[in-house]
Image: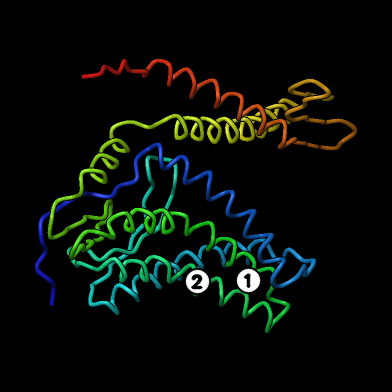
Amino acid sequence: MKEVLQQHLYSIKINFSQTIRLSGYSVVLMFIGVSLFSFIVGDKGSFGNPLVSVLVYFSTIMIHEAVHGLFFKLFGGNPRYGVGMMYYILPYAYATSEGDPYSRRQMTYISLAPLFIICALAVFVAALFPSTAPYAAVAFVGNLAGAIGDMWLIRQIWRFRKIPGVMFVDNKNSIEVYGEQTLPKRLADSLAARDKAAGWWPRFSNAVIVTFFGLVISSMLVSLVLSFLNYQGRFTLGSEGFKLFGFDLSNGGFTLSINFLPVLCAAILVGTIIASAANSKSTKVHTTK
């Protein structure tokens, strides 16, 4: 039986700026996941079959959403599933239970269950069957990186922990928040400020992420174009002491080298300039009463 919802308080949505940051954070989690899995299980010294690894990755995504759906069902919901593309940047799969209200604690279990269950199973399988470790690593890392949206959601719903009778309804594109009273002014102001405009840090982090991946992708595209044109010789972007990437097509060989530290430094510099310039334009004059 569905509970009778109180007044609608807020809609939790991921905007364009947050989508960019979550994409970057997901990549960071991939590197963390590789290190964490190696630390727990040990280095097995094998990468496995690429095709099998791809199948394991997509299977992990489906299992991840199935676990969400299972917990929706356990708490009385009617889950359904689908896929989408967030702002044409971040592809995602989803499980939702539209119209069904859940408490903050239930939403926490629903959101985090796939993260802990699948990662724990991956470690268990790798320890029990060492030959499967490369594929268990794919499941572990893919699941951890893919859970970045769930982690973001947990942070959002726990901001409403002091609202009496707070309930959450999971829709495809938003989480609707209901409660027995209006939002406290401090929380309402905080949410309004976040929705109205991004501050210096969001602008900076977005610019760093976009610049970093833009440089990496550009280097790959340049390499493909030069290779297609049968370019012979070397091509370098940057100076010898600060080389971003280098391309070498000579003697029948093909080499692309990307120096991630200089690329990251360049991205940070661009991010600082963009965020500071935007901040100076949006500076307001404060008056005293």
Q: Nearer the viewer, residue 161 or 255?
A: 161
Q: Which residue is mark 1?
A: 136
- Alpha carbon distance from label 1 to label 2: 14 Å
Residue 71 is situated, as x and y percent measured from the top left of the image, at 34, 75
Q: Is residue 267 left or right of residue 275?
A: right
Residue 131 is situated, as x and y percent measured from the top left of the image, at 73, 77
Q: Secondary structure at mark 1?
A: helix
Is residue 268 placed above or below 191 in the rendered structure? above
Q: Residue at x 40, y 58 (%)?
A: 93
| Image quadrant where one finds the N terminus | bottom left
Is residue 240 placed above or below 40 in the rendered structure? above
Earlier residue among tags 1 and 2:
2
Residue 38 is situated, as x and y percent measured from the top left of the image, at 71, 66
As shown in the figure, which amino acid type bears the numbered disc 1?
Ala
Q: Which residue is mark 2?
A: 116
Q: Residue at x 13, y 56 (%)?
A: 181
